[in-house]
Amino acid sequence: MLELLTRGNTVDVIVLTRDDHPIRAEVLDAINSQQGVTLHLHRVVGSQRATDHNRWQTIARARNVGRHLGQSPWVMFVDDDVR
């Protein structure tokens, strides 16, 4: 499926963070170093709720919010601790 992503495509990059601190520089550098595509960066803060049984519920909720952001045919999720 990745072969369908060609030069000039637009990708909405959804960065999931745990709080509203600045996104780590190495994460932004890695995103900005991508070539051959146009990237639109979006950020979703995934705040834990008292009703969450585990962190996966928090992450899933944040991803569900993020999937409604942007308008490109491609979406990429990036966690704030991944480069």
Image: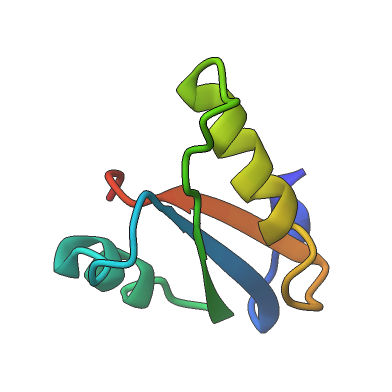
Residue 68's quadrant in the figure? bottom right
Question: What is the residue that sits farthest to the left in this orientation?
Answer: 25
Residue 10's quadrant in the figure? bottom right
Chosen colour scheme: rainbow
For image coordinates 65% across by 71% down, the residue present is 11
Query: What percent of the width, then of the height, locates residue 59?
Result: 55, 37
- Whether residue 72 appears in this view of the structure is yes
Query: What percent of the width, then of the height, locates residue 27?
Result: 26, 61
Figure check: 31 above or below 52:
below
For image coordinates 65% across by 47% down, the residue present is 63
Figure check: 1 above or below 80:
above
For image coordinates 83% across by 68% down, the residue present is 73
For image coordinates 78% across by 75% down, the residue present is 72
Number of labels in the image equals: 0
Q: Is residue 81 left or right of residue 76?
A: left
- Whether residue 37 appears in this view of the structure is no
Figure check: 27 above or below 10:
above
Q: Nearer the viewer, residue 25 or 68?
A: 68
Query: What percent of the width, then of the height, locates residue 17?
Result: 39, 54
Query: What percent of the width, then of the height, locates residue 33?
Result: 31, 74
Which quarter of the figure is the N terminus placed in? top right
Question: What is the residue that sits farthest to the front in this orientation?
Answer: 50
Q: Is residue 81 left or right of residue 65?
A: left
Q: Nearer the viewer, residue 16 or 54?
A: 54
Q: Nearer the viewer, residue 38 or 49?
A: 49
Figure check: 46 above or below 5:
above
